[in-house]
Image (cartoon, rainbow, N blue to C red):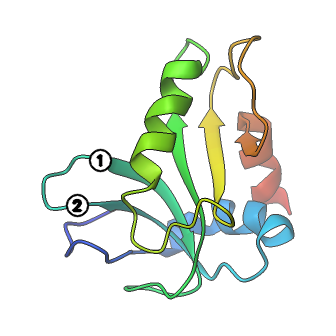
Amino acid sequence: MLTARPAGAITSEETARPARCLVVAWWPTVETVGGWWNRRFDPEIDLVGADRAPVADTVSFVGSIKWLVSPLDHHDLTALCRAAVEVPGFDPGTTGLVLASLSGVAPDLDLTGCSLWTPQDLVDSWAG
């Protein structure tokens, strides 16, 4: 459960274990996965992978979770790209982007530079 926290703080908990299993191969320095939002609650970032909490030195990835019946499209990716730069520690040259989607992505969506997590990825991470 994510709780209110000061801007720039990142929380984590044991229920983030599946995400931890997924990120280990891609971002081995990530020790905590949580979310982030500023005091205006705009933007809200669903996933932040960082080296430590509550205040990170290094943000390895930021991401968006869309658990809808419609696939992610360019609007969702654009929103994530716009919001990501607000996260303290985000570096467009080194911080990865993650999209987690129940229904995949639109066929014309260019995922260059992004990682896509599917329901099967999440299920497999629990088994790993």
Q: Is residue 87 in view? A: yes
Asked if residue 67 can be seen in this view, the reply is no
Closest to the observer: 114 or 65? 114
In percent of width and height, residue 69 lies at 55, 13
Three-letter amino acid code of the residue under disc 2:
Asn
Q: Give me the C-alpha separation between circle 1 and circle 2.
A: 7 Å
| Residue at point 47%, 74% (across, down) | 89
Q: Do the residues labelled 1 and 2 touch (CB within 8 Å)?
A: yes
| Mark 1 / mark 2, whichever is N-terminal | 2
Position of residue 89 relative to residue 106, above or below, is below
Tell which of 51 and 88 is nearer to you.
88
Q: What element carries label 1?
A: loop
**Quick one: label 1, few (<14), some, or many (20+) residues within 10 Å?**
some
Indicate the quadrant where residue 118 lies.
top right
Q: Residue at x 65, y 60 (%)?
A: 19
**Which part of the image, by quadrant, shows the N terminus?**
bottom left
The residue carrying mark 2 is: 38
The residue shown at (46%, 84%) is 56
The residue that label 1 is drawn on is 43
